[in-house]
Image (cartoon, grey):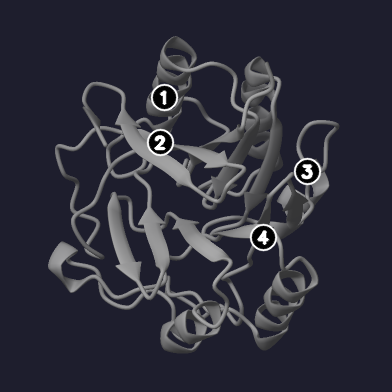
Amino acid sequence: MKRDFTTILQLTDLHLFANSDALFNHVNTRDTYNQVLSHIQQHYENPDIIIITGDLAHDGNLETYQFIADSLKVFSSRVYYVLGNHDNRENANQAYPLPFLSTETHCLLDNWQIILVDSNHCPKENNYEGEISPAELERIEKLVVNYPHKWTVIAMHHNVPDHQDRGINIELRNHEQVMQHFERFNTIKLVISGHVHQDFTINQNGICYFSTPSTGYQSLSKSGQITTEAPGYRWLKLYHNGRFETDVRRINVWAS
């Protein structure tokens, strides 16, 4: 019997190193990443699609991007990604694409489309805030208009809305413009992101904005203070009728 949904696994903020013993904020991110992959294999069937929303390689090394690709072969899934503020674009572009790991920024499904958005326009030194360029906003609009009968998922690195109650200041410099742009289209259903190393949901004007835990450490604020929350990932089911389900799982606790 044919399923009426597509499954998507979101991983984010891997912050991996070529050196398997390297630490990021006193955490061995290679170990936690491997634990996350093991947890997924234990609790879920093979996802249809994997999306990585940025900060794949903390050191930016070519070898790190190659390690990530090799590690994901266990899923036999199509993999898409966007880069984060810690990534090295040149080395990522040298490592990918691969037969199962795509550099495409648009994915068409039966009743949905996934638009992968670059939020690293005009990066500033020692500043982790993002920005979406006018050209990217124009591209999003064109794709939404060209596929009016498909529901839309936006995947990007930086979170869009302000969320002061979780210790997060604005992470996208042009966030108001971006949210107004998204909210013009009633087929944009959800926006998934990472960057802030924590899980939250904001519903605004018909769009669900989801941030997903890092596969490494979790942080309370821009200070980088580590919390006791476990590494995690997000699972999505996109139904043909436009409905979706999602939950966040962690390697030693689980919440939805």
**Of 84 and 58, which appears nearest the observer?**
84
Dot 2 surroundings within 10 Å: few (below 14), some, or many (20 or more)? many
Give, as a three-letter code, the residue at label 4.
Ile
Whether label 3 touches label 1, CB < 8 Å: no
SS at badge 3: loop
SS at badge 2: strand
Whether label 2 touches label 1, CB < 8 Å: yes
**Of 219 and 138, which appears nearest the observer?**
138
Marks 2 and 1, how far apart at CA: 8 Å
Q: Which residue is mark 1?
A: 36
Quick one: which residue is furthest to the right in this view? 99
Give, as a three-letter code, the residue at label 2.
Tyr
Q: Which residue occupies 41% across, 15% down?
A: 43
Q: Which residue is mark 3?
A: 102
Give, as a three-letter code, the residue at label 1.
Val
Q: Quadrant of residue 214?
A: top left
Dot 3 surroundings within 10 Å: few (below 14), some, or many (20 or more)? some
Q: Is residue 200 left or right of residue 220?
A: right
Q: Earlier in the sequence, mark 4 or mark 1?
A: 1
Give, as a three-letter code, the residue at label 3.
Ser
Q: Which residue is mark 2?
A: 233
Q: Which circle, 4 or 1, is nearer the viewer?
A: 4
Assign the N terminus to one quadrant of the image. top right
Is residue 74 positioned above or below 11 on the image? above
Is residue 220 positioned above or below 61 on the image? below
| Residue 66 visible, this orientation | no
Q: Quadrant of residue 210?
A: bottom left
Q: Earlier in the sequence, mark 2 or mark 1?
A: 1
Marks 4 and 1, how far apart at CA: 25 Å
**Of 222 and 193, which appears nearest the observer?**
193
Marks 4 and 3, how far apart at CA: 13 Å
The tag on residue 115 is: 4
